[in-house]
Image (cartoon, rainbow, N blue to C red):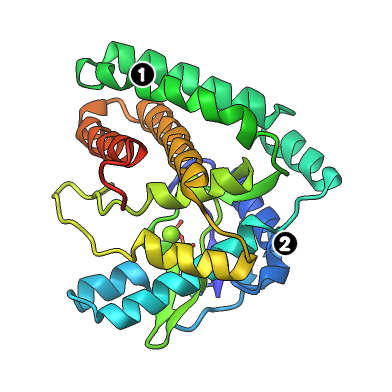
């Protein structure tokens, strides 16, 4: 499989490619990502995972068999557990930070996203009421930041999960990977399980494996339980992920109005989960 990166398709091609290469090398031992076979200027060669993106399956065959979907969720949980627990050595951490983050630390970057997201929420009437939600993330961050550093993918959408009739096959598309921790990774996963349409203009709601099924696979692989205390931390880190989304979509789009209802829907869903009113 050859993947080609071009600024005309999406800006930042060179950085996107370098990040993807960095992640594929980092994750190789997990066996849930394609093996990198070659790195050639503006393209890479990697293994082709046999199957289809989960999102495509849903579009072709709506109303999936629930047993199969449960299997997919379990497999994804196992896969995420391997990725989130792939240690990033001190040397690779420094290499990543100097190549992609101007040497900035995770602490500095997280604070930056929260501050900027707060400013944006203050300036957009529909988002003003979410300011307190963002503030609540700060309570959980110090504990999360004590964890070891790893690389995580912030946009875990279902188009990048490859499945076949037996269930989960692997993950693809790591152009947007960042330095995080295990809980930050789990937060980014949880953030993507809300069946909230993102890029599409219509409000078509996708099917989605449940958090419970992913959690089961995750716990089995790591041998540790995600209890209620951990769950709250994970949802708080989903809100940190939401801050990054707010900042990214605000900076990249001159018309932010398309994104506002999407952010509202996500922030409401995450807020409800955080209040334990609607565990997903
Ligand atoms: N290693 C791979 N194995 C199988 N299919 C792949 C692989 N890499 C990419 N694809 C296919 O190509 C599509 C686009 O690749 P992706 O890496 O997700 O790029 P994009 O940034 O455009 O989303 C995927 O949705 C998938 O169908
Ligand atoms: Mg993709």
Can you give x and y, in whole percent of width and height, for residue 48 in the image?
54, 79
Nearer to me, 112 or 278: 278
Nearer to me, 181 or 253: 181
Can you give x and y, in whole percent of width and height, for residue 100 in the image?
67, 37
At horizontal 66% and vertical 62% (from top left) the residue drawn is 24
The N terminus: image quadrant: bottom right
In screen coordinates, is 60 left or right of 14? left
Around disc 2, counting alpha carbons within 10 Å, would you say few (fewer than 14), some (14 to 19), or many (20 or more)? Answer: some
Disc 1 secondary structure class: helix
Indicate yes or no: mark 1 CB to ligand 2 under 8 Å: no
Tag of residue 25: 2
Can you give x and y, in whole percent of width and height, for residue 119 in the image?
39, 13
Around disc 1, counting alpha carbons within 10 Å, would you say few (fewer than 14), some (14 to 19), or many (20 or more)? Answer: few
Q: Looking at the image, do the residues carrying marks 2 and 1 touch, with CB atoms under 8 Å apart?
A: no
Camera sees residue 87 = yes
C-alpha gap between disc 2 and disc 1: 39 Å
Tag of residue 132: 1
Q: Quadrant of residue 146?
A: top right
Identify the residue at the far right of this view. Answer: 91
At horizontal 25% and vertical 49% (from top left) the residue drawn is 196
Residue 208 vertical position relative to residue 118 in the rendered view, above or below: below
Residue 277 vertical position relative to residue 31 in the rendered view, above or below: above
At horizontal 29% and vertical 51% (from top left) the residue drawn is 194
Disc 2 secondary structure class: helix
Indicate yes or no: mark 2 CB to ligand 1 under 8 Å: no
Give the quadrant of ligand 2: bottom left
Specify which label sits upstream in the sequence, 2 or 1: 2
């Amino acid at each position: 499989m050859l993947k080609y990166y071009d600024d005309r398709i999406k800006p930042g091609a060179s950085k996107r490619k370098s990040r993807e290469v960095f992640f594929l090398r980092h994750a190789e031992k997990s066996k849930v990502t394609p093996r990198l076979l070659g790195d050639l200027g503006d393209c890479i060669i990697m293994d082709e995972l046999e199957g289809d993106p989960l999102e495509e399956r849903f579009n072709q065959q709506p109303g999936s068999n629930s047993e199969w979907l449960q299997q997919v969720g379990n497999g994804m949980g196992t896969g995420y557990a391997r990725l989130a627990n792939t240690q990033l050595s001190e040397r690779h951490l420094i290499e990543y930070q100097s190549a992609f983050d101007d040497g900035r630390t995770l602490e500095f970057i997280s604070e930056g996203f929260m501050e900027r997201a707060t400013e944006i929420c203050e300036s957009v009437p529909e988002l003003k009421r979410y300011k307190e939600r963002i503030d609540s993330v700060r309570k959980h961050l110090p504990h999360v930041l004590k964890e070891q550093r790893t690389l995580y993918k912030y946009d875990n959408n279902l188009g990048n999960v490859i499945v076949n009739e037996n269930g989960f096959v692997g993950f693809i598309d790591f152009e947007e990977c960042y330095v995080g921790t295990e809980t930050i990774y789990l937060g980014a996963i949880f953030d993507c399980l809300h069946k909230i349409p993102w890029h599409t203009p219509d409000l078509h709601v996708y099917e989605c494996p449940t958090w419970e099924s992913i959690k089961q696979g995750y716990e089995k692989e790591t041998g540790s339980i995600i209890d209620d205390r951990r769950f709250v931390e994970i949802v708080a880190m989903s809100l940190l992920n939401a801050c990054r989304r707010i900042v990214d979509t605000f900076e990249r789009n001159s018309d932010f109005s398309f994104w506002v209802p999407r952010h509202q829907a996500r922030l409401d869903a995450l807020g409800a989960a955080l209040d334990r009113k609607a565990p997903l």
